[in-house]
Image (spheres, rainbow, N blue to C red):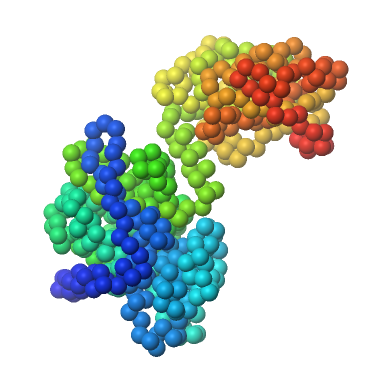
Amino acid sequence: MEAEEMTLDRCLRQEILFARERVYRFGQATPLERLNLPGPGPEIWVKREDLSTVKSYKWRGACNRMALLTPGEAKRGVVTASAGNHAQGVALAARTLGIRARIYMPRSTPNVKQSAVLHHGGEFVEIHLSGDSYDEAVGAARADEAATGAVYIHAYDDLKVMAGQGTLADEIVLSGHGPFDAAYLQIGGGGLAAGVSSWLKTYWPDIEITGVEGVGQASMKAAIEAGKPVTLDQLDLFCDGTAVRKAGELPFQICQQTLSRVETVTNAEVSRAMRVLWEGLRCISEPSGAMGLAAVLKNRENLVGKRVLVVLCGANIDFLQLGLIAQSVGLANQASKTLRIRIPERPGTMLKLLDSCFEGMNIADFQYGISDEADAWPVFTLSSDTPARLDAVLQRLDAGGYVWEDLTGAVDVVFRAIPLRGDLLKNPAFLRLDFHERPGALHDFLDQRIRGNANLCYFNYRQSGERIGRALIGLDFPSPYERDALMMTIPSHGEGYRLCEAVDDEASKRLRGC
């Protein structure tokens, strides 16, 4: 067995040498850049595969494999399955070589990846959306292969594909920035880790190479523990580029020899690493692309003084996903609690709560809708640089006699299910408000403009990271005259705020469930 594994490793190294002659027909070498972090830590170098033609390393393996097709194979065309990045590599090679390609992708594949495949492949590619996972797409592509005789181009379990990926390691060795003490390589099926680790170990035998997988998609870790590739029952799709249920057989044989260990990282750790890449290099990584750095940051104290390599393997992320990741990172970087607090349902009590218990606190989220005649239960998410300040809020609530409960992570809060009983409203008005995101701006608006008989009956605000905060506010009045008087006299602009608009009657009815 050992002789066979060594033979496979030697074959892979030889194929990486041959791949040098092929892959640069399709794309150019990518840079290796230093990532500087404040404070003590390792010297981190990032291989910028996000700057390649297809914004991912996957072009290397796909193009190397397709460049080896015989004329007869090229005539039959190719078929493949991909979560997105490998598909772009196949599309690039198909167009360059004039070969027809059918590409099967899960139905959940982000639009940015589908559009990129069509951009790179043009008239030479067809996209078929099949199934809800990569494995289901593989099944459909394999059925196509059997029915049509097209050549299947595997995303990772192919010696020539692994060799193509290994050319990025060749560029690292030739960069002059080595040798490296350690490398952290993300793993999906294992093609990248196998090709890169084999080449790095050839030139720097003492380098410690760690494989990195997501907590909910650790197929290579499971394979190494079992002694063979095994199928995961569940699969987390946050890092969609590495979401593979079963490690490749060939990559497994290489990785179990070249990797010192396999570590896992959480989605939150990956999100924080994406932020570090943005702040340090001004680059946007897809989640899978930041997994290696996530593991480095996790082990930062143990890596002080060492020269460490990571691969930013791709930047093909759906734009809509960026907002959710940025928001989650913003809260994760601070201590936070979500509290539901009981106050009397009458004018002025909300402001009293803010004055007496929340002074100086950052309110990241504020949800409230009137649901009871006697009591109000507003929900606040508070964040702070230190947990001690949050504890002080709890002490002030207790001292003030407030009844409260901790709803941190509650499903209804996360999904913003804000109750509002329209039958309890007398003469409501709803306002769209913008205010400067600075301490006291929202409080000042409520204090200076909503005094008197106006009762706060609805509030919907969530911090977005912008300099301007946006809120939808509902006020209820004893009479229509008092409501109309406020609406006529409230300035459209004031200290720290701007009144965007009053919600029209139809929208107001929908809010009240009328």
Could you say which is closer to the camera, residue 29 or residue 129? 29
Residue displayed at 41% across by 77% down = 97
Residue displayed at 14% across by 60% down = 203
Mark yes or no: residue 350 visible. Answer: no
Residue displayed at 43% across by 69% down = 92
Q: Quadrant of the N terminus?
A: bottom left
Is 383 rendered above or below residue 62?
above
Is 409 rendered above or below residue 387?
below
Q: Position of residue 472 (x, y in %)?
A: 68, 30
Q: Quadrant of the C terminus?
A: top right
The quadrant holding residue 366 is top right
Q: Position of residue 329 (x, y in %)?
A: 45, 38
Q: Position of residue 346 (x, y in %)?
A: 73, 16
Residue displayed at 42% across by 53% down = 315
The quadrant holding residue 151 is bottom left
Residue 82 shown left or right of residue 57 in the figure: right
How many numbered marks are there?
0
Could you say which is closer to the camera, residue 332 or residue 217? 332
Residue 123 shown left or right of residue 470 in the figure: left
Could you say which is closer to the camera, residue 25 or residue 386? 25
Is 156 rendered above or below residue 436?
below
Mark yes or no: residue 151 visible. Answer: yes
Q: Kindly give the residue lying farthest to the bottom in the view shown.
A: 72
Q: Position of residue 211 (x, y in %)?
A: 28, 54
